[in-house]
Image (cartoon, rainbow, N blue to C red):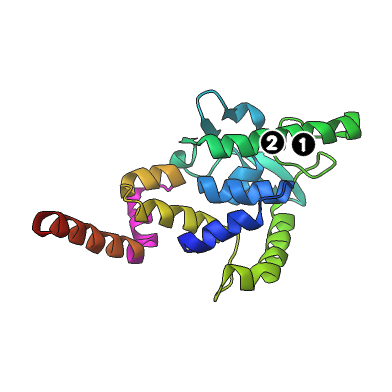
Amino acid sequence: MLSLQQAQKLMELLRDYSTFNTIVKILLLTGMRSGECLGLRWNSVDFDNKTIFIDKTLSYADNQWFLSTPKTVRSTRTIAIDDNAIDILKKHREEQNKQKEIVGAAWQHPELVFTSCTGHWYDRSLLNAQFRRFVKKNKEGLKLDHNLTIHGLRHTNAALLLYAGEDIENISAHLGHASSDITSRVYAHMYAEVKVRMAKTVSSALFG
């Protein structure tokens, strides 16, 4: 998990366009699971209403990748995205369309937001390997004292929401947890810190 300063540094390191950079930025901005992000289809992205509908996840079984439904009811959800995320996705769509023209009819998955450069699945094993190399290369710049995984971006998104004062139930729905109890348990250490800070905020307001 990253601090706010580390997350800001990460976004700076990802400023140049690439499919990998776009995936990482979207994961950090949305808190999606990596499988949900890699299974995202363009018709699930509503630029006008600034939402993403999550109802698929990229899965692997019997030596093949495929789209499946999320494992819990609450994992199927609609999340809001802001103008920054929209700009990132629109830029990616432009670049993807250029690549589609080059590859032509061999492009296998035109419905998917994220694919390989030839239109195949952008699988999680590739993403995880790329992210490990990226973290190793930028560990000093990010001032990391721990190993950061792709799933750590989801934890970072949740932490930033908690520290911003968002309600635990809203965060749970945003993340697609089966219940808010799960969210409370996973982020109990952070939630306790937030509650202490909230108490100090009220006291400071009342007593100066």
How packed is label 2: few (under 14 Cα within 10 Å), some, or many (20 or more)?
A: some
Residue that protrudes farthest toward the front in the picture: 208
Q: Position of residue 79 (x, y in %)?
A: 47, 36
- Residue shown at 63% from the left, 51% from the top: 24
Q: Position of residue 48 (x, y in %)?
A: 54, 23
What element does badge 1 sit on?
helix
**Where, by quadrant of the figure, is residue 183 drawn?**
bottom left
- Residue shown at 59% from the left, 44% from the top: 36
**Where, by quadrant of the figure, is residue 85 drawn?**
top right
On screen, residue 45 versus residue 109, left or right, reads: left
Q: Judge whether residue 204 is colored magenta.
A: no
| Residue stretch in magenta | 176-189
Residue 107 vs residue 130, the one in the foreground:
130
What element does badge 2 sit on?
helix
Vertical arrangement, residue 26 with respect to residue 135, above or below? above
- Residue ID for mark 1: 95
Main secondary structure along the magenta-highlighted residues: helix
Q: Position of residue 71 (x, y in %)?
A: 52, 45
Q: Amino acid at mark 2?
A: Lys
Q: Judge whether residue 177 is colored magenta.
A: yes
* Residue 196 visible: yes
- Residue ID for mark 2: 91
On screen, residue 201 versus residue 143, left or right, reads: left
Residue that protrudes farthest toward the left in the picture: 207
Residue 10 vs residue 184, the one in the foreground:
10
Vertical arrangement, residue 26 with respect to residue 192, above or below? above
Q: Position of residue 142 (x, y in %)?
A: 59, 67
Q: Amino acid at mark 1?
A: Glu
Contact, CB < 8 Å: mark 1 with mark 2? yes
